[in-house]
């Protein structure tokens, strides 16, 4: 589904990703772990099409198509979703109006009619229940004054509404208390199917107790230096990243 | 002359008018040489040969103008066609409150005291356009809310121009008196019904007594041939709240002179505006809040989006007199220029003579937030639509303080339409 080959990317001539290889198949959950500054968020930004980053080498294939040159919206239309570490506050647009616009623009890109209002309402109701979101919350301005937990829950709500094929969750666990974490993880698990895939980017192993990965990759200094099963996450939690650093240096 | 053909020339108003004519004769129309009119020129408008009084009375059917009302609420209505009161389109009242015409207020003995106390009292008598209105105004709305009265229904004041004359000048004059502890909501609109030039020079005086509250909404979305000079003067007594929201979406030239004068402590004044214009339209907001007394606050928030070759002016003045200690005066003016041919002249002016005050002003002329753009685009919203949605958000944010849901919904829709954003339902 997602195939990344020898990906190099830089921001303002500073190389941050130095040859990433990653292969994600439908039905899989991958976790990308690494210390601060290892390039985790850059990787998610580059996959999503953030124009602040320049891909200098390598390619990103999504569903068999090179998406390296596509605009963020075109990638979204193909079924890519990025849950932001720091969702942007947009005063003046309600959550509902925002999600409605996103869904209808995606449908329009596929040559479909707008989703009928009653269908949209039904879907909003279902998905907000899934994430235990209060209705009042939906008429508030997007992310404005939301707590950390509300912002993340709202990201997963958007994911639930947009039904992407591949979701990248960038530090979704940061700023969440244990209850919010459980709700968010539960939502992700319920949305998971054999046809879609999830990439979880995280610093800590905590979230992976709830969203259990099939593969864990360790990102260090712009490269994936170690891959393994879910047990690798436990090992990292126990021993930290230093032993890997040493292993790499050797 | 004017509504004086029904007024005794010995009436006090006669002297006021004579005086006003003198002022206008002396000063004439303002030119760009006047500091307050540096960025707004009336030259092009004054080339038209306006008829000041219509030759014939016009009538229009409610169905033809229904869309200009906020029609989904129960309201009082006072409607004028080419400056003449239309009784069949209006719903006036004298039960508990007075919603009627200035013509009636000026002639009926029972209003004599109110007129003596309030008519032409707080206007800038040296302002030539206000003087012109005082001299020649023929009609307007008279709203008198006595002490303790909370008016349940909003009052809609509408001025229609039929465009039967090749060019027409209208000079409405409104007087609003809000008694102690009274509350009233007013919606004002000027609307031209065809493309013949119309120049409206309106004066509104609003007096708010102790603990009185007035919320005033101005919806300006007129034809490209219509121009409006709106002069609104508000005086506030102790503990009163007054808010004016001005929504400027259309018209050839619009000038909003909005002045607040404080006459007691613990007063709250709110001035908000959304301007979205294009083509060669011009909108000028010139505000003045005169803090003359201690412990009062004022909040100004004006947002503007300018496309094509449109031009905007924001001239916001806050004066804090020496006596006005503990004043909180805030002013915010944010603008987005959509086209590189559009212009905004923003001039915040704070004149502070007291030492214990909190005043601030912020003025920005900017682009849209790139990070927000990226966020929207990752959700599948293309660049153009994302930009429109962010502009919608930028403007829409001012609507939070609008207290009539139907007005909010209407303005919301106008903003969405103006920016080409499809907004449907909300939960």
Image (cartoon, coloured by chain):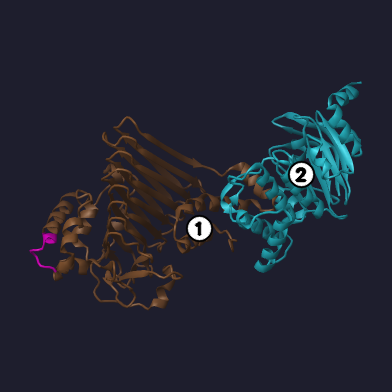
Image x and y of residue B28, in percent: 20, 52
Question: According to the colouring, which chain is cyan?
Answer: A
Q: Main secondary structure of the magenta part?
A: loop
Q: Colour of chain B?
A: brown
Q: Residue at the location (29% across, 47% down)?
A: B238
Q: Is residue A81 left or right of residue B149?
A: right
Front residue of B25/A222: it is: A222
Mark 1 vs 2: CB contact within 8 A:
no
Total residue callouts = 2
Image x and y of residue B422, in percent: 59, 61
Q: Which residue is mark 1?
A: B415
Q: Residue at the location (42% across, 61% down)?
A: B221
Pair 1/2: label in front: 2
Front residue of A26/B128: it is: A26
Image x and y of residue B278, in percent: 47, 55
Alpha carbon separation for disc pair 1 and 2: 34 Å
Q: Which residues are magenta?
A: B7-14
- Considering only vertical position in the picture, is B150 above or below A47? below
- Considering only vertical position in the picture, is A154 above or below A46? below
* Residue B251 in view of the camera: no
Front residue of A145/B383: it is: A145
Image disc number at residue A169: 2
- Under tag 2, what secondary structure? strand
């Amino acid at each position: 589904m997602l195939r990344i080959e020898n990906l190099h990317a830089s921001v303002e001539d500073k190389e941050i990703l130095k040859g990433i290889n990653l292969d994600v198949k439908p039905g899989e959950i991958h976790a990308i772990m690494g210390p601060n500054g290892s390039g985790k968020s850059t990787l998610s930004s580059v996959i999503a099409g953030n124009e602040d980053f320049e891909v200098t080498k390598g390619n990103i294939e999504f569903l068999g198509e090179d998406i390296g040159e596509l605009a963020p919206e075109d990638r979204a239309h193909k079924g890519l979703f990025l849950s932001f570490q720091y969702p942007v506050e947009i005063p003046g647009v309600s959550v509902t109006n925002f999600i409605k616009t996103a869904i209808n623009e995606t449908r329009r890109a596929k040559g479909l009619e707008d989703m009928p209002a009653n269908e949209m309402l039904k879907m909003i109701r279902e998905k907000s229940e899934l994430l235990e979101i209060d209705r009042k919350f939906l008429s508030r301005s997007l992310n404005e004054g939301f707590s950390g937990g509300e912002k993340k829950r709202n990201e997963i709500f958007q994911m639930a509404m947009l039904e992407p094929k591949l979701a990248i969750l960038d530090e979704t666990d940061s700023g969440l208390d244990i209850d919010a974490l459980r709700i968010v993880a539960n939502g992700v698990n319920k949305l998971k199917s054999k046809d879609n895939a999830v990439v979880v980017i995280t610093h800590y192993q905590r979230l992976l107790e709830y969203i259990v990965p099939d593969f864990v990759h360790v990102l260090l200094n712009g490269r994936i230096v170690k891959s393994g099963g879910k047990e690798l996450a436990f090992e990292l939690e126990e021993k930290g990243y230093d032993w890997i650093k040493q292993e790499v240096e050797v | 002359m004017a509504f004086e053909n029904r007024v005794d020339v010995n009436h006090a108003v006669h002297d006021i008018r004579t005086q006003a004519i003198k002022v206008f004769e002396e000063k004439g129309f303002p030119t760009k040489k006047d500091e307050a009119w540096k960025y707004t020129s009336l030259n092009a408008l004054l080339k038209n040969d306006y008829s000041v009084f219509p030759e014939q009375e016009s009538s229009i059917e409610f169905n033809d103008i229904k869309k200009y009302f906020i029609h989904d609420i129960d309201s009082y209505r006072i409607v004028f066609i080419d400056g003449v009161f239309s009784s069949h389109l209006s719903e006036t009242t004298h039960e508990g409150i007075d919603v009627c015409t200035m013509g009636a207020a000026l002639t009926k003995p029972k209003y004599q005291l109110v007129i003596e106390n309030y008519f032409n009292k707080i206007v800038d008598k040296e302002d030539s356009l206000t003087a012109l209105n005082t001299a020649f105004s023929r009609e307007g709305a008279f709203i008198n809310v006595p002490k303790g009265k909370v008016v349940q229904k909003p009052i809609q004041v509408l001025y229609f121009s039929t465009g039967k004359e090749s060019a027409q000048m209208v000079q409405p004059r409104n007087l609003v008196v809000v008694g102690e502890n009274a509350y009233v909501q007013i919606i004002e609109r000027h609307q031209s019904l065809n493309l013949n030039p119309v120049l409206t020079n309106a004066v509104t005086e609003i007096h708010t007594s102790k603990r009185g509250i007035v919320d005033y909404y101005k919806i300006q979305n007129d034809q490209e041939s219509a121009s409006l000079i709106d002069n609104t003067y508000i005086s506030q007594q102790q503990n009163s709240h007054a808010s004016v929201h001005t929504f400027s979406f259309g018209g050839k030239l619009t000038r909003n002179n909005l002045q607040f004068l404080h006459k007691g402590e613990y007063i709250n004044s709110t001035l908000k505006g959304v301007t979205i214009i294009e083509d060669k339209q011009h909108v000028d907001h010139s505000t003045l809040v005169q803090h003359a007394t201690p412990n009062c606050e004022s909040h100004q928030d004006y947002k503007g989006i300018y496309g094509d070759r449109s031009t905007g002016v924001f001239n916001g003045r806050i004066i804090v007199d020496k006596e006005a200690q503990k004043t909180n005066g805030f002013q915010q003016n944010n603008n987005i220029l959509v086209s590189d041919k559009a212009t905004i002249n923003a001039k915040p002016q704070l004149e502070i003579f007291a030492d214990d005050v909190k005043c601030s002003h912020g003025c920005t002329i900017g682009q849209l937030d790139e990070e927000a753009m990226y966020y929207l685009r990752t959700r599948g919203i293309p660049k153009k639509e994302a930009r429109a949605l962010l502009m919608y958000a930028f403007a829409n944010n001012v609507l939070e303080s609008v207290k009539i849901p139907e007005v909010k919904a209407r303005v919301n829709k106008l903003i969405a339409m103006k920016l080409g954003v499809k907004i449907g339902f909300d939960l």
